[in-house]
Amino acid sequence: MSSLTTLVKLLFKTWFRRKASIFFGIAFPIMLLLVFGSIFGGPSPPNYRLYVRNLDVDQNGNPMPLSDAFVKALNGSVFEIIPLKPGEPTPKSTGFAAVRILTIPKGFTDSVLNMTMANLVNIMQDTILRLVQMAGEQIPEEMRANIAASMQQINMFKQSIKAERKTLILEGSPDDRVLQPIEGIINIIASKFETALLNASSTMEIKLVYSEARQLRLVDYYVPGYIAAFIMANGLIGVSSLVSDFNRRGVVKLLASTPIPKSYWIVSLVVVQTFAALLLTAVMFAVGWVVFRMTTIPDIFSLMVVLLGTLAFTGLVVLIGGVVREAEAVTALGNMLSFPMMFLSGAFWPLEIMPKFLQEAAKYIPLYYFHAALRETLLTGSVSTALAPSLVLLAMAAVGMSLAVFTTRWRDF
Amino acid sequence: MVASPVIVAENLTKKYGDYTAVDNVSFKVYEGEVFAMLGPNGAGKTTTVEMLECLRTPTSGDAHVKGLSIRNNSDVKQIKKIIGVLPQEFNAVDNLTVFENVQLAAAAKGAKDFKQILENLGLWEYRRRLFSKLSGGLKRRVGLAMALVGEPEIVFLDEPTTGLDPEARRETWLYIKRLKSLGTTTVLTTHYMEEAETLSDRVAIIVKGRIAAEGKVRELVAKHGGRTKLVFEGLDEKVLASLRSKGFEAEQTQEGRTIVRISNDSEIVEVLSNLRAMSIEVYPEIRQAGLEDVFLSVIGSRLSEEGFLA
């Protein structure tokens, strides 16, 4: 067995026997995939919690019929309705559960009935006037006088209706970014409710059509990001801790005093990281397929992207190890670089939900190009769209590895 | 027959900015000998051996290992084939077994068979045990095995017993002695007087990057160590004055002991006769001069167990 093969085999053994390597390299990514996949990757639509304080009650405290029906209409949509009694205090926000309260005012049922009646009368008057206008001179003079008299009576009836619009109050935190979409959903439900009361039907409808034949789900979107993020983390944290440990123990010094060239040391680290990256990719996909019935299948191009990402980030950490002399500082720097990259590059969640300046900043983060290339190849299966980020990754890998070879010291540590 | 030098260091100097770690050091190491570099922490011992191990480039000067220059890149490759190195504070990889750690060094040196070295160092029975599960002594033996695998002609052992308990230290000495008996040239750095005295054929005392004294241990002791000492417990000032009046060089230590320096064995009888004449029947401890005395004489201070000048 050649020196290089033995070195690779032994480095892989030491990587594999490190509890931290297995946890951060395989177990932790799987845990994240299971947790986030279950939260965002399932088939059920989002479910928003909405507190409803219904003040529209009768003398016995029972909800009036229309307010009750409106609450039931809300409950049948994307909301999980939690009723609040009229005197019950406003619940406090706990953790990340935002508190949103919809207050239905007293007199809601009467108001809706009156407003509906007024609307019906308006519609009726409008209809008669349009018909009279359309018929024109064909309507005899006597009939025209009768219609005018009837319209006067209808007007008198309309004035007797107490058509007072009631305001429903939606209360929530200004930090709640879902509050406005929720207001929109309630408005839509209210409109449908009103249309039903008028005994009318919608004049338009929306039909949902999937633009692609492939049934991609959020979990398909997350997996490439997680794979990229953890290959990066394994490179920056895993390799840096291994290199600094070997330095601290004098093992690198011992190796450097032997005829083995430093290129063998760097190649061994890269090969071990590549094994680890491929293992992580395989395990993540296996979990995705089995647990989440994921449909994405990695092709040869996506595996090439994995390889490029591994080279880029292993090169980066070997470069750091070459430039920074203190073994502990290498690990610290590895940690310092990897965590912001994980959260700011869009690997864990879509960039679109982040503020504009962070979206721009993400484009200067190396990890962005790794997960972008991997997502493009895996989600769209398109080499052409993955080409640009892949080329950036290739450049990073080439520069990183060249600088790593140049800066790694095999003498004068 | 005079052995030929396998290492010749000529005016080796290593500077880090304004700090001079090794200052114009020259010495020779002969084939088959154990050459010790003795000195306090920070004296420049490790920097010196690391230059010989081709791990550091000298700022000026040169050294030849078996005729090969440590400054010449093509020579360096050849030097690395014939040396074995145990770095300072070396610890093998915790989660590799004894066998795998030695295999790592063997692979790096291109050595195929290393069973013999494991057997010689009594490690064969521990070969499947993880390095992290070994005692301090066994760990150091693994380090020795990693340095010795591939049968190097010259071995550099940098502070091989630092941090070991006395038992493990003596155990390591046995293996270094065995190495010497096999004819391997060994360069040893240490701050333990006893270690240098017990193991080495020749010693170089290094302080502040310079060699303060160099030679065979006995020669150094004879030259710088001073006379044999008789150490008495419980003699009073009156007795001390009496001995001085008889021409003996006597002094009292802070601990209350009386030390009488003698030039030859017959003076022992003379001192004891004089004491008997004063009705004092005591038996002194006889202390031969050693490296400690040499160190004290050359440097002017003692070397503590932790490696600092006291």
Image (cartoon, coloured by chain):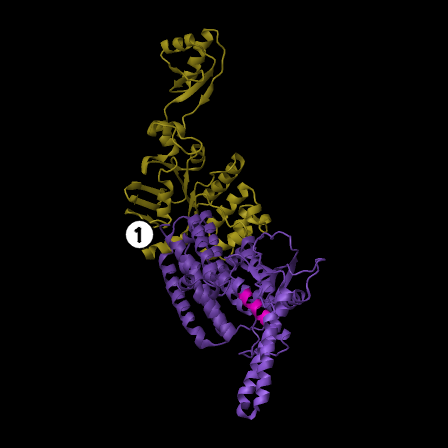
Chain colours: A purple, B yellow
Q: Residue A202: horizontal and vertical position, in percent?
A: 59, 78
What is the x, y in percent for residue B7? 35, 46
A20 versus B192 height, above or below: below
> Is B214 situated left or right of A281 in this image?
left
Q: Is residue A190 magenta?
A: yes
Report the residue at 45% width, 35% height from top. Answer: B195
Q: In this view of the protein, can residue B172 be seen by the observer?
A: yes
Residue A260 in view of the camera: no
Camera-side residue of A102 and B60? A102
Magenta span: A181-191
Q: Position of residue A193 (x, y in %)?
A: 62, 71
Chain for mark 1?
Answer: B
Location of residue B81 by image quarter: bottom left
Q: As shown in the figure, which amino acid type bears the numbered disc 1?
A: Arg
Report which residue position mark 1 lands on.
B71
Q: Nearer the viewer, residue B188 or B33?
A: B188
Number of marks in the rendered image: 1
Q: Is residue A242 magenta?
A: no
Q: Residue at x 42, y 34 (%)?
A: B307
Question: Could you tell me residue A72's position as x and y percent?
Answer: 66, 66
Magenta stretch, main secondary structure class: helix
SS at circle 1: loop
Q: Residues within 10 Å of mark 1 (few under 14, many from 20)?
A: some
Q: Compared to A261, does A375 lie above or below?
A: below
Furthest residue in direction bottom, as rendered: A138
Which residue is outermost to the right?
A60
Q: Answer with the quarter of the image where residue B260 lies.
A: top left
